[in-house]
Image: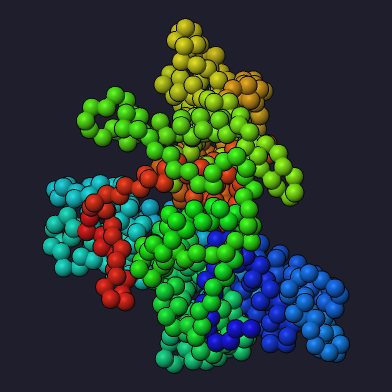
Amino acid sequence: LPTGTTVLEASAGTGKTYAIAALATRFVAEGVAELSELLLATFSRAATQELRERVRERITATARELGQPSQDELVQHLSKGTPEQVALRRQRLARAASEFDSATIATTHSFCQQVLDGLGMAGDHEPGVTMVEQVDELRREVVDDLYLRKYARPGADKPALSAKEAHEVARAAAGDSTARLEPSSADPASAAGQRYGLARAATAELQRRKRAAGVRDFDDLLILLRDVLADPDRGQAACERLRARFTVVLVDEFQDTDPVQWEVLRRAFHGHATLVLIGDPKQAVYAFRGAEVLSYLDAREQADTVERLGRNWRTDAPLLRALDHLYGHASLGHRQIVATPVDAAQRTARLTGAVPLRLRVLPRDAGGPFSGQFPAVGALRTTVATDVAADVVRLLDSQVTLTLDGATRGVRPGDIAVLVRKYVQIAAVRDALDAAGVPTVVSSSTSVFATEGARDWLWLLQAFEQPHRAGPLRLAALTPLLGWTAEQLDAAGDGVLDELGALVREAAHRFEAAGLGAAFDVLSARTRIESRLLSVVGGERRLTDLRHLGQLLHRAAAEDSLGVSALVGWLSDRVENPDAGAGGERSRRLDSDAAAVQVLTVHASKGLEFPIVYVPYGWDGATWSTPSTLRLHAGSERVLDVGG
């Protein structure tokens, strides 16, 4: 078993969660720690729930099988020794299984909140403060106020940045509060100076308004706990209380840790407890949330031991060899992050009749007749999506077979996933597959507020607000919620506006009397929304989004007592900033559970596995040479340059 601080590097498919559950089981069975003395921390709530179930299952199964003939290496290991030793291990595991609710398996933020609550006065935690997941709406309010105050008054200077740019700068500064803001020496009247001044003012005003409103977000918790542990007067006592509570700490997905999280773990446990940090720097994908791989590299430098999980249990050996040929020993974003080979548990290919790795290259005339210049990237994106659909059709019609669980069969749509870089690319791939007659299902962290359905609801609500105006009525009529086409509207002439107005007023009255759900029921019955959408290509996806949005709008109206005008504003804000709000609520739902090609973003695919994967936009990673904001390091210090 590891002691001190250990970094355990676990490439994709090497059984990371299995290893964590096995380590936790061994620590308990061998008497190193009681279950209540273990801390298991990970990055997301979904990962926390999965880890909790896996650890519970591992402890329970091992307790049941201990001392019996087994092919399980962990059971075999713990079954060694005298009958008394084995019986004692079984007793410890059985007790842990019965007391499993006492286990601390939590996100880093949840752990911080528990610690601050436990420290009480030592933690300076205010029980009356309300915890919120994010403060995006408050931040937008702050930026709007500051922007208008500076640039909307008579005689004000011409803005050096647009309102949209102001929000981008403030979002970057608020999301990286530990970084040093630059350019601090810029002339306040210059464009860079105005951007810097707005970032500083927005950050300070956001903190002031949070205090006034009595709210804290998760980042505030981390910073508060870090400051408590670093305090020269009370920090030592707080650290000792943590070490007395947790003697073994396992941190999953450590490559996604930000500098504040690592400082909390380092101060509390490094050199004083068993600290096992599990992660893979090649999978560090959350830089946009403040995580940075340099925290991982710093931990690896300070660790007493660095170990690797060296066997891939997911991927076939022929594909691993092909990927090693392509990426082997290449540095990935940092000279210390290198793709190293791993062994494959699956020695043969489960896909027969096809090569394990293909690189498809479009000819130079793919975007149209070659003119001596590079074709427009936008046209190529559509061409690539069409090519993916055609290739999927060829694969499904081919003699290629797949062997899973000992059974060999042809390839089915449900065996295939298409991974894209950005959710705006999902529609192109989905539309191309739909046109080719291939069933698809969108499965991603795409915000439902970024879909056509959000625009449809916005147009309908604007018609609720102004049912006497022809413009809003015509826009609402063109949505699937009312179901008219432009040709039908044109042919019907102005006379149809009375009919549309009556229907919209009836639905609006139902909204005022019984809520948006009742209004949706009226429209659904009168315009046959469900049957209309399910009869067209892609309609199931559209219907799922409309229902999801209807539920979110109904809840917002009910919880905050929003009328039509307020609800229009609520939805307008989210259409403009689709990624704001709690991720679990805004993430799009699956349109069906049918066997279909899954289309999802690379971020959403993390931790999933599919027999066949297409990555059509891996090449499409162009970045602006002059980004609006830039994160960098000056020595060991994080710097955020907002000068543009």
Of residue 135 and residue 596, the one placed in the foreground of this image is 596
Residue 194, by quadrant, is bottom left
Q: Is residue 270 above or below residue 514?
A: below
Q: Is residue 607 visible?
A: yes
Quadrant (top left, top right, bottom left, bottom right) of the C terminus: bottom left
- Left or right placement of residue 322 versus residue 64 in this view: left
Name which residue lies at 49% across and 8% down: 492
Of residue 358 and residue 630, the one placed in the foreground of this image is 358
Residue 352, by quadrant, is top right
x and y, in percent, of residue 328 in the image: 43, 61
Name which residue lies at 46% across and 32% down: 387
x and y, in percent, of residue 435 in the image: 53, 25
Name which residue lies at 66% across and 67% down: 18
x and y, in percent, of residue 2 in the image: 60, 83
Of residue 473 and residue 385, the one placed in the foreground of this image is 385
x and y, in percent, of residue 457 in the image: 51, 33
Q: Is residue 515 visible?
A: no
Quadrant (top left, top right, bottom left, bottom right) of the N terminus: bottom right
Name which residue lies at 62% across and 45% down: 351
Q: Is residue 281 above or below residue 121?
A: above
Q: Is residue 502 above or below residue 453?
A: above
Q: How is the image coloured?
A: rainbow
- Left or right placement of residue 129 versus residue 175 in this view: right
